[in-house]
Image (spheres, grey):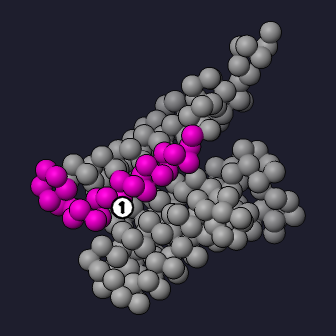
């Protein structure tokens, strides 16, 4: 790793740390997205609180800040795994942005942008898992967790079974996938106690114990 590689990783983190959902909500509503809905700065919470158009813009921008660093790492990086390192740095930036006191989003859109250019086939398979869950059970959080685990498992299997992905790429990809799962820890708790909100339809349910 040389100085250019270090600059790419730092730049990827700083780009990933730009909180587009926060900025766009401030611009449109003059409000802090972190005090609305789920408190998350990502596209799903923007959709629930600000509507489809702003959510779409947030999604595209968050996706792009994951994709561009991978492209930069591939074209300007020297280490053979720099594309994966740059993508990982962008996701870490989104999850722990220096601009918001290291309290950011859950990284799914940014991760999708990075993963799609690091390993397209595993990403498309993971995306199918996500869409299948969201269109049937309608939990974005569960779909995100399942898709992340699917992506990481395919990368690791691809490395050990056929050597398709080198060790560094497989390790970085699997590590980021686990980070995305960890970022959904509160959602996993809500899923387990039956209070998680679906993408559309029913509102968040009150646990049975709380009704007594």
Give the side of residue 54 with respect to residue 143, left or right.
Answer: right
Residue 75 visible somewhere in the drawing: no
- Work out whether residue 54 or residue 162 is closer to the camera in this orientation and state it: 162
Residue 114 visible somewhere in the drawing: yes
Q: Main secondary structure of the magenta part?
A: helix
Badge 1 element: helix
Span colored in magenta: 159-185
Q: Residue at x 42, y 40 (%)?
A: 146
* x and y, in percent, of residue 68 in the image: 46, 76
Q: Is residue 94 above or below residue 123?
A: below
Q: Residue at x 61, y 70 (%)?
A: 17
Name the quarter where the C terminus is drawn.
top right
* x and y, in percent, of residue 20 in the image: 67, 67
Q: Residue at x 21, y 49 (%)?
A: 157
Q: Residue at x 35, y 50 (%)?
A: 151
Name the quarter where the N terminus is drawn.
bottom left
Give the side of residue 172 with respect to residue 46, left or right.
Answer: left
Q: Is residue 47 above or below residue 188?
A: below
* x and y, in percent, of residue 147 in the image: 41, 45
Asked whether 180 falls inside the magenta stretch, the response is yes
Q: Residue furthest left?
A: 162
* x and y, in percent, of residue 152 in the image: 34, 50
Q: Quadrant of residue 193?
A: top right
Give the side of residue 57 with respect to residue 76, left or right.
Answer: right
Residue hosting label 1: 172
């Amino acid at each position: 790793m040389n100085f250019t590689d270090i600059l790419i990783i730092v730049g990827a983190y700083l780009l990933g740390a730009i909180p587009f959902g926060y900025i766009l909500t401030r611009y449109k509503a003059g409000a802090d997205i972190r005090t609305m809905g789920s408190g998350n700065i990502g596209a799903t919470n923007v959709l629930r609180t600000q509507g489809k158009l702003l959510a779409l813009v947030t999604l595209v921008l968050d996706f792009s800040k994951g994709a561009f660093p991978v492209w930069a790492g591939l074209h300007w990086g020297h280490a053979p795994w720099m594309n994966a390192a740059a993508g990982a740095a962008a996701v870490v930036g989104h999850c722990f942005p220096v601009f918001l006191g290291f309290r950011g989003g859950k990284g799914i859109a940014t991760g999708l942008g990075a993963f799609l250019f690091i390993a397209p086939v595993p990403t498309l398979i993971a995306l199918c898992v996500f869409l299948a869950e969201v269109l049937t059970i309608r939990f974005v959080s569960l779909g995100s967790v399942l898709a992340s685990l699917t992506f990481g498992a395919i990368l690791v299997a691809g490395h050990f079974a056929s050597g398709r992905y080198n060790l560094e790429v497989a390790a970085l990809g699997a590590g980021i996938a686990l980070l995305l799962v960890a970022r959904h820890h509160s959602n996993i708790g809500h899923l387990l106690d039956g209070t998680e909100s679906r993408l559309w339809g029913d509102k968040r349910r009150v646990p049975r114990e709380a009704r007594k």
